[in-house]
Image (cartoon, rainbow, N blue to C red):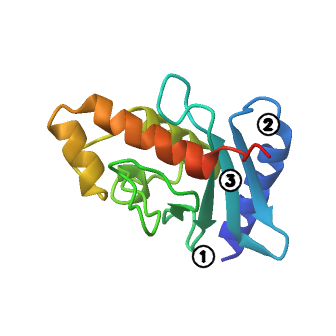
Amino acid sequence: MQASRARLFKEYKEVQREKAVDPDIQLACDDSNIFKWTALIKGPSETPFEGGVFQLAFAVPEQYPLQPPQVRFLTKIFHPNVHFKTGEICLDILKNAWSPAWTLQSVCRAIIALMAHPEPDSPLNCDSGNLLRSGDIRGYQSMARMYTRLAAMPKKG
């Protein structure tokens, strides 16, 4: 546990230094628990998620970095690799392809890449996956854009 705590403190310092370097990711540690983090990520450009800001929750295990963090979307998103109700993410690096070389920041980058390049053959959201697998790109993009507008964009008021 001491090693994971030290690693997380190191990552926290790097995040503070890199804030200006990576404007698409805002990663923050819970004030009272180094094992709980949140991130705000910007939807990638030229995708239905462009213009949206999506919140992620990280639950970091005490065995980190030997075990991957549990990451989920708190913001609703229509994407084949994200469970619509729970926000669970199907991404190999969060499961069997994890390596201690990954950091929380690089996990955020991988999630942004997944947003831009969905994998419809391993869907957690079958509706979204079926649209893509059947070739209905327009249907998928319009649904994803609608949910981005509803859940991930600031309300104009």
Q: Residue at x 52, y 62 (%)?
A: 72
Q: Is the residue marked by circle 2 packed among few (<14), some (14-19), or many (20+) residues within 10 Å? A: some
Q: Residue at x 76, y 43 (%)?
A: 156
Tell me the quarter of the picture where residue 109 sits.
Answer: top right
Quadrant occupied by the N terminus: bottom right
Q: Which mark is residue 22?
A: none
Between 135 and 32, the one lying in front of the other is: 135
Q: Which residue is drawn at 22% across and 33% down?
A: 136
In primary-sequence order, the first of circles 2 and 3 is 2
Q: Which residue position holds label 2? A: 18
| Foreground label between 1 and 3 | 3
Element at badge 3?
A: strand
Q: Which amino acid does label 3 sit on?
A: Ala
Between 32 and 139, the one lying in front of the other is: 139
Tag 2–tag 3 contact (CB < 8 Å): no
Q: Is the residue marked by circle 3 packed among few (<14), some (14-19), or many (20+) residues within 10 Å? A: many
Q: Which residue position holds label 3? A: 39
Element at badge 1?
A: loop
Q: How far apart are marks 1 and 2 (CA)?
A: 25 Å
Q: Which amino acid does label 1 sit on?
A: Glu
